[in-house]
Amino acid sequence: KVSGLGTEASHTEWVVDDVRPYILHAVSQFGYRRCLFGSDWFVSTLATTVGRWVGALCDVVSDAQLEEKRQLFGGTARAVYRL
């Protein structure tokens, strides 16, 4: 699950480039079919909003193929949780 990175960075000053290497590392190690989006809500509200977190993740994976993005933002979760 790709989540919780905003609370591991500076709560008030983090930027996309602070979390980018961690997201890219997870994707490179596990692939999009084994990574899934997570909001880490309610804890994440200490450092970000859901919209800001989604925006950051979208920015980081902007070069990914459409199918890879679909996996990250829903497909993997549907498979894992059998939805």
Image: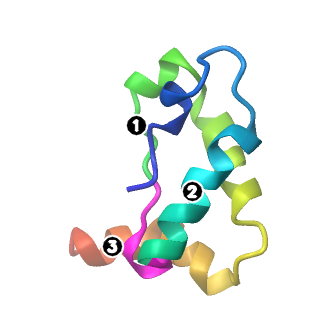
Q: Position of residue 15 (x, y in %)?
A: 75, 33
Please state if 50 lies on the left or on the right of 17 as rendered.
Answer: left
N-term mark: 3 or 2 = 2
Q: Quickly name the residue at label 2.
A: 23
Q: Viewer-proximal residue, 16 or 74?
A: 16
Q: Quickly name the residue at label 1.
A: 40
N-term mark: 1 or 2 = 2
N-term mark: 3 or 1 = 1
Which of label 3 and label 2 is nearer to you?
Answer: 2
Residue at the (50%, 16%) spot, across then down: 46
* Mark 3: amino acid: Arg
- Categorize mark 2 by other alpha carbons within 10 Å: few (<14), some (14-19), many (20+): some
Please state if 20 lies on the left or on the right of 72 as rendered.
Answer: right
Residue at the (69%, 65%) spot, across then down: 61
Q: Which residues are magenta?
A: 31-37
Q: Quickly name the residue at label 3.
A: 78
Q: Position of residue 24 (x, y in %)?
A: 60, 63
* Mark 1: amino acid: Asp
Secondary structure beneath disc 1? loop
